[in-house]
Amino acid sequence: VTNALRMFDLDWTPDGRFFAVAVLGAAPADSGVRVFSFNPNNTPPINTTPVVTVLSSVAGQQSVNWSPNGRYLATLGDSGIDTVTINETPTTYTTRIFEFNGTTLTKVAFADPASMTNNGGGIVRVRWSP
């Protein structure tokens, strides 16, 4: 991973043990979603090696948000995440839902990118409803 990462969003799990980061790297191989662990009893409290990384093949991710129970992670970003190509136009965003078991993210759902085209504005964040 290069040092030239831009962070777009960060969200903590409700229990405070993990946080997800949506990043854009200098190269597509550096872009995507990273999940880190946090333990205030460790030195340092944040493990600098991600627990899991889901890389993007196009432009990166815009937004991340944990479900209220911390079991699912919603992401919003380019359509190339996790090497599943739906539409590689960088202005087309896809929302994906991943299940998290503490060590891996498994994609369980995604939204139709045709309904989320970013025409100079549009959707830039994803959030769960309470």
Image (spheres, rainbow, N blue to C red):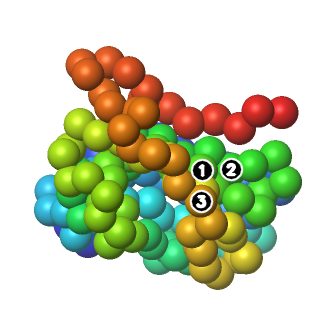
Which residue in the protein does label 3 denote?
109
Q: As shown in the figure, which amino acid type bears the numbered disc 1?
A: Ala
- Choose top left, top right, bottom left or bottom right for residue 106: bottom right
85 relative to 90 in the view: left or right: right
Asked if the residues shown at circle 3 and circle 2 are in contact, with their CB atoms under 8 angstroms apart, the answer is no
Q: As shown in the figure, which amino acid type bears the numbered disc 2?
A: Trp
84 relative to 12 in the view: left or right: left
Decide: is 126 above or below 39: above
Q: Who comes first in sequence, dot 1 or dot 3?
A: 1
Report, in whole angstroms, how far the alpha carbon at label 2 lies from the one at label 1. Answer: 6 Å
Q: Which mark is residue 74?
A: 1
The residue at the far top in this view is: 121
24 relative to 28 in the view: left or right: right
Report, in whole angstroms, how far the alpha carbon at label 1 lies from the one at label 3. Answer: 9 Å
Describe the element under mark 1 as helix, strand or loop: strand
Residue located 32% across and 31% down the image:
117
Q: Position of residue 104 (x, y in %)?
A: 61, 79
Q: Label 2: few (<14), some or many (≥20) within 10 Å?
A: many
Q: Quadrant of the C terminus?
A: top right
Which residue in the protein does label 2 denote?
66
Residue located 40% across and 33% down the image:
116
Report, in whole angstroms, how far the alpha carbon at label 3 lies from the one at label 2. Answer: 14 Å
Q: Position of residue 102 (x, y in %)?
A: 71, 76
Q: Which mark is residue 93?
A: none
Decide: is 124 above or below 39: above
Decide: is 22 above or below 17: above
Q: Label 3: few (<14), some or many (≥20) within 10 Å?
A: few
Q: Position of residue 52 (x, y in %)?
A: 52, 75
Q: Who comes first in sequence, dot 2 or dot 1?
A: 2
Q: Position of residue 92 (x, y in %)?
A: 29, 40
Q: As shown in the figure, which amino acid type bears the numbered disc 3?
A: Ala
